[in-house]
Image (cartoon, coloured by chain):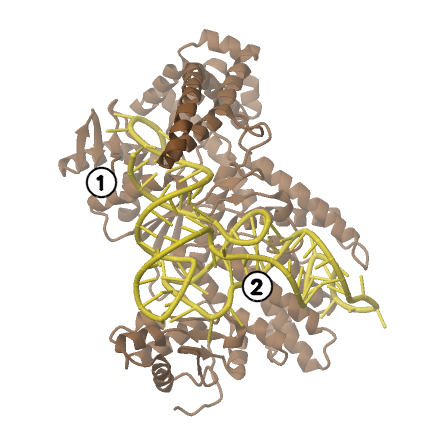
Amino acid sequence: MQSVGFVHNHHAMNILAELRSRFSKALDEFTDDPEPFAEMVRPAQDPRFGDFQANCAMPLAKRAGANPRDLAQQLVDELDILDLCDPPEVAGPGFINLRLRDDWLEAEVNAIGLDEKLGVVPAEKPRKYVVDFSSPNVAKPMHVGHLRSTVIGDALCRVLRALGHDVTSDNHIGDWGTQFGMIIYGYKHFLDHSAYQQDPVGELARLYRFVNTLCDYRGAKEKLPHLEDRLDELKRQLPEAQAEAKADKSHRKKVKRIESEIRDLSGTGERSGEIEQTRSRIQAVESDPALREAIQSHPEIARLVRDETAKLHAGDEENNRLWDEFLPQCIAALERVYERLGVSFDLTLGESHYQPQLAAVVDDLASRKLAVESDGAMCVFIEGNAAPFIVRKSDGAFTYATTDLATIRYRIDELGADAILYVVDARQSEHFDLLFAAARKWGCLDVELTHVTFGTVMGEDGRPFKTRAGDVVGLESLLDQAVAQARKIVDANDDAKPGGAELDDASRAQVAEVVGIGGIKYADLHHNRDSDYIFSWEKMLAKNGDTATYMQYAYARIGGILRKGGVDREQLRSAGERIRLIEPAERALALQICRFPEALEAVAAEYRPNQLTQYLFETANLLSTFYEQCPVLKAEDDSTRNSRLALVDLTGRVIQYGLSLLGIGTCEQM
RNA sequence: GCCCCCGUAGCUCAGUCGGAUAGAGCGUCGGUUUCCUAAACCGAAGGUCGCAGGUUCGAAUCCUGCCGGGGGUGCCA
């Protein structure tokens, strides 16, 4: 055992990483490959077991055929760890429980206080990440569906950067598809010139909706009889299937399937079915004079729109001129939303950017025999997948598959990507499976390709989030609504303050913006991204519980303490007051602060921002407990007061910085 | 037909690639304000982790089957 000296020159560190490294050295005596066993050092699951626990003795003993408790003790004897921890204890079947030394923890929390980065150590091997997220179709207004990708992608970029990686965010906008054919067609036939003068993007969006509705109408008209026939057929089949199921239970699945399809078509009490929806879409066109007129004078509109798109792609002069005119305005409109969300991109390289490269991509794939012709289309076939990856359609047009391959090449060759992350709806996972497999065959081997999936945002009825009328919810109106609700809460709270209202109108508006936008983002981020989640206004801005508001409030309270105490943050920090850990609540809070780097690593490990929200919630919780139990300004003596001021200020920095890595703001007063 | 995801407290969800007595928030019930923002804190009740097997010292977690829900599925992205 080494002698235990006083801790000098203490540097902030990732404690878990440090403990693992210590274990790794000790484990050399027991195995050739200590890393996986060192990974089994974890934060303790229960405070009774200390601060951290090592679970590696059991599997190791099993391999060696040894007694796990004995082996745990031998491992403890090898450990050089007593500068950090109290003597480790072997417990249960062979757990090793670790408790940080109080003096060490105190030194650590003080070191973090002196560290700009709050103990986060830059990655030893920084990687080049390209993060592809948000990716709306320009010209279509953004809706809730874009929110998750945008919010999660932005948070991941921020966290990866904080960990010292080189991150390029890239908005792969849809700027080359059919929607431009629709706008161009609309511009040529239905333009309201004065509206376009006043609000070009608004008019373009109207044209898009108008033309889209017309194109849709034709399809709906054709589809409706088929849907009705299908429903009749299913209703005929149902009794027969039910009879079969009665006789033989293995047929029950078939009944379920029929019933479910009938439900989809004819709807339920609460929800209209596909037939009714199709009917009402037809009805909407036929009952609107302008639309009805347009559909009569443009019967071939769907084909004509496709032609406009094809002309654009073929280099038609006028359509390309219109595209050049429309695109910057559409992008400017997107920028306004991003600015409000506090999201920015390093690159906005849309589909159009890769257009010149697509022919060469297909040629290259073909020359390597990776792509072959099938039913007139050029396809890459991936073993084990029935669906081909179509890189050129039978009509000669390229697909998003082609664009995506070209994009991967570009990101590797031109951007130097080590890893490409796609923050995209989980429903597209098959596409990405095929894309990645095709890219590997194509020789993109030394790059991480990850589809960072996320689930669907549901309404309170458990169905995809829509307005009452069944439309998708526009993103801007969603933000407006959130801010308006936040404003009500801010007003009520400020009016109810014991010492009277503190905020003027402008401040209240500013707080409402931060709380409203933060609430929306947090609602998204705090769920495991894989799960669908149910969107709830009430929960989003709740004052209690796991919400952005709770953390923002914790931060504002700290601001309140410092203000009331007449303490200047800069002075406090430069004075270098030493934090002393006496009360249990102080120690618990300090330990939590020291775990900040762990939280960021946990986010980066699987690209899960909810690891950070969870950490911040726990931090704010521990702060509240501390706040109840330990008076700061009225502490019993100056040294305690100064220690607590420093601790509280440091906690505030962690909360503020942590929230900022989620793209969420804070206010000094609220 | 094939493929993927999900099923954990009344509700909404976590659960750190197999670890100790399964956690949190909301809601419910009870308590806390001469005291730094009660937008807070403390406590209680609440579970067959969909079901049945299997793998092993040990399973919500891994494997198989079944039940239930959602999504995708050769020329939209």
Placement of A53 over or under A430, stated as above or below: below
Residue designated by label 2: A618
Most foreground residue, A58 or A303: A58
Q: Which chain is brown?
A: A
Chain letter of disc 2?
A
x then y, percent, for residue A7:
48, 85
Most foreground residue, A313 or B61: B61
Placement of A237 over or under A248, stated as above or below: above
The mark found on residue A382 in the picture is 1
Q: Residue at x 64, y 48 (%)?
A: A541
Residue kind at label 1, given as amino acid type: Ile
Most foreground residue, B24 or A558: B24
Which quadrant: the N terminus of chain A?
Answer: bottom left
Q: Is disc 2 in the same subunit as disc 1? A: yes
Q: CA distance from mark 2 to mark 1?
A: 45 Å
Q: Which chain is yellow?
A: B
Q: Residue at x 48, y 31 (%)?
A: A329
x then y, percent, for residue A446:
24, 53
Please indicate, yes or no, whether residue A248 appears anywhere in the rendered image. yes
Q: Name the element at disc 1.
A: loop
